[in-house]
Amino acid sequence: MISLAVDFKMINRVLPVTFDDGLTLAVDFALDPATMEVCFGEIVPIDDLPAYTGTYNVDPKFTAQKLATNGKKMRDDVTVEAIEVQRVSNTSGGRTVYIGGLING
């Protein structure tokens, strides 16, 4: 069973919301009789989704990358590491920025 607490800030009311069988929404309007229509569109139980088995830590590239996460159950966030950036003084008295690391040469 999944339980949610719905808080209506404007009228200071908390309604208990439950999904008793995983798909049926039940709302207890204990303070007043009320009607509420809810449409979730397509409900996909999380247990039916395949697990994402790819990497969760990504090294950046200068070309596009795509992780095949659509429709997958994720166990964690994906972390994309920062591209190395270095700033050095140059002979003109300014600063040179190297994106992707220093170039020796």
Image (spheres, rainbow, N blue to C red):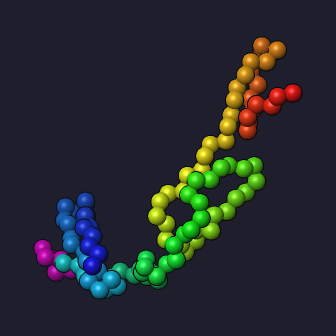
Question: Which residue is the extreme one toward the right?
Answer: 105
Left or right of 98, for residue 6: left
Q: Position of residue 37 (x, y in %)?
A: 33, 82
Q: Residue furthest left?
A: 31
- Is 67 colored magenta in this rendering? no
Residue 40 visible in the shown view: yes
Q: How many marks?
A: 0
Query: Residue 39: x, y in percent?
Result: 40, 81
- Could you say where residue 18 lies in the image, as x and y percent from the top left? 25, 77
Quadrant containing the C terminus in the rendered view = top right
Please name the residue shown 25% across and 64% down the image: 8
Is 75 in front, or is 85?
75
The span picked out in magenta is 29-34
x, y (%) of residue 96? 76, 25
Q: Residue at 43%, 77% (x, y): give it.
A: 46
> Residue 1, located in which quarter of the rendered image?
bottom left
